[in-house]
Image: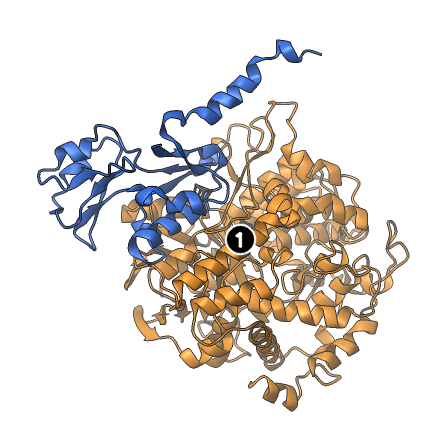
Amino acid sequence: MQRSLNIDPGKCTGCRQCEMACSYENEGVFNPSKSRIKVFTFDAEARFVPYTCTQCAEAWCMQACPVDAIKVNLATGAKEVHADLCVGCKVCTIACPFGTINYNASSGKVMKCDLCEGDPACAKACPTQAITFVDSNWTGLDKMRAWAAKTDTGARAN
Amino acid sequence: MGWARKILRVNLTAGTVKSEPLNMDWAQKYLGSRGLGTKYLVEEIDPKVDPLSPDNKLIFATGPLTGTMASTGGRYTVITKGALTGAIACSNSGGFFGAELKFAGWDMIIFEGRAPSPVFLFVEDGNARLLPADHLWGKSVWDTEHEIKAQLQDPLVRVSTIGVAGEKGVKYACIVNDLHRAAGRSGVGTVMGSKNLKAVAVRGTEGVKIRDFPGFLKASETAKGVLAGNAVTGQGLPTYGTQVLMNVINETGAMPTRNHRDIQFEGAHKISAEAMAEKRPTDGKSNLVANQACFGCTIACGRVSMIDKTHYTVVNRPQYWGASGGLEYEAAWALGSNTGVDDLEALTFANFICNEQGMDPISFGATVSAAMELYETGALTKEQTGGIELRFGSAEALTQLAELTGKGEGFGAEIGLGSKRLCEKYGHPEFHMGVKGQEFPAYDSRGIQGMGLTYATSNRGACHLRSYTVASEVLGIPEKTDPLATDGKAGLVKAFQDATAAFDSAGICIFTSFAWTLQDVAPQVDAAIEGGWSVDRMVETGERIWNLERQFNLAAGFTAADDTLPKRLLTEEANSGPAKGRVNDLGKMLPEYYDIRGWTPDGVPTNETLARLAL
Ligand code: SF4
Ligand code: SF4
């Protein structure tokens, strides 16, 4: 079964454990500035929103890459950057409508979420389950459940 | 590894910055953050120096776990000689600034001298420079952070700054990072202001390496499990914040009320965690909007609140309509029960102002409460207060004074003196409720006896964060002791003091200690740095740090006579609750404490003690 990252900002406390886990997984150090997932804090509204690549089926970045350095991992569905091919031209960062693929000046290549070969470090590190890794076909399940719970009011009127 | 092994020395007088290697011998003896910063300060300044002179230094220090995946591993400490107390000052803050400083590759920044005109420091990884801050002088914490990010064109920069309070010399000005996280106590912000240093902005992209990554991840994950499974750190703090304590401490009969004249507050339920979560009749919304974590924290105790837009404090003032740092227990108590004010929105507003202008809400609230007692006894007149009716219970007086004090204006300038200087000025030194010039936090030591010894012996003046025996005496952590008994408290206080110094020096939050002991911390520290960090070594390091701080204070001129409590707590009996009829029996605990510490009956560490601790 293909799985996707499922982000529920309502549960996020803004702790950045996910960014730390991501940077360790990919860079071997604790360094949120190199994290592929970023948590945004909207101070005045007290909202904390993690955001990363959603692995578009027809990925803009992949289509834009002139050297075909971004390829689909057939096992996970992730669009992965092949560092040996990437020339650092950054065209993909322009093509991506969501900003989730970015240039890494230290490596001269771009970086994006690759789902950690099917075992994402951010989801494991999140203490509040704001990030989970679930069936790609049912990322809406939790929200459906929550709304479903509100719709059978008649049956409960005892 | 663990340590960045680099410190940044900034000479404000000369306008120079330079990088130095971290003294690794000291790092092995004092660990980091509080301990290591104190070692540098003690070595570099004359203990008798005027805290506000250019010869005092100001140190921002991270610990070996700062910027790691350890839960709460994002803290930094500001160490200096305190403007409020003249004692060693060391104030710890969460938020995100500390980790950012570590990611930039620095263990510590040492500021010395005084800039000829206002400056701020910008650190971008290995590069640091001083930039003019004339355009920021006179601005609040909130505006300063906003303007620095705009000026540097970098929304990811982290800012630690003083507000107007620190510029105006309010004696308990704090240093605020990330808008509402503060190195709060003892006037560390006052020292920063005296140096013409407005802010420190940091952007770090180098990251943190540790000694043994796999071992560390295992240890930190196990320890996170302990936090998640504990009732206080797993449920109480995330749900209610530190405000979980309000009703508990009130029932214990240990909640200082109206400048410690009473020890239970009839309005506690109106300013408690439960009240913050209730829907207001005015707008159908609750005061509390969310809980927020500091960097790396899996507890997330932080409160974020919104003030009722129809409340008198914010009508037509949209700058206060957004969400910001809400009431923690200490602020709710100091601004609330201690002044007799039970208007939750007014307290939240006063707390916003404390964050906005950078002042410690504990000392501010306690000073207002002392002023209220002066006013009610006739020692202060309405003319002197500039027309403010300074009565216990007056929300208007509280919020008006918060704004005036934050800007150092009118009678606020006198509130900015702190309660000791204020009460002396108006002829009633006995109304000052504090130790070594620093106002008490939220526990009355008649109802929790061990806290009397905690306060009397705290190296930074009255403080709950040096040995939180409330954990044992009220909450039963790690085991329950009787809050009204004095037996065994000397040993309890020493054990808490030493362990706390070790927690603080590691770079983690002391709130983890509701669930963690050093058994949980030592394996994380050990995996992060070299040196073989066992529990025993952590305890010994904590004890060494405690004695180092003590020696600084003794050299600064403090004596055993300063290890005492105000007369009110030693002679006036508690008038209600379980502690009714009790005073604090400090005299029964203090001699035993000195003895257990290996100090003379005059509170001076003996030569054997110093030798044992390699001091
Ligand atoms: S780890 Fe979870 S709670 Fe923490 S910032 Fe990331 S998504 Fe939010
Ligand atoms: S427990 Fe609270 S104060 Fe401590 S690090 Fe976590 S959120 Fe910050």
Q: Residue furthest right?
A: B581
Bin the neighbour count of mark 1 within 10 Å (Cα to Cα): few under 14, some 14-19, many 20 and up. many
Residue at image x 51%, y 73%? B533
- Tell which of B569 and B423 is nearer to you: B569
Question: Pointer 1: what residue?
Answer: B224
Q: Quadrant of residue A73?
A: top left
The local secondary structure at tag 1 comes to: helix
Question: What amino acid does circle 1 point to?
Answer: Lys
The residue nearer to you, when weighing B199 against A60, is: A60
In the rendered image, residue B515, in percent from the top left (x then y), is placed at 62, 56
Rendered colour, chain B? orange
- Count the numbered circles shown: 1
Res. B75 visible in picture: no
Q: Is residue B487 left or right of residue B230?
A: right
- Please state the horizontal and vertical placement of residue B601, each as a whole percent of the image: 75, 84
Image quarter where the N terminus of chain B lies is bottom left
Q: Is residue B284 visible?
A: yes
The chain drawn blue is chain what? A
In the image: residue B553, left or right of residue B104: right
Which quadrant of the rendered structure holds the C terminus of chain B?
A: bottom right
Image x and y of residue B336, in percent: 69, 44
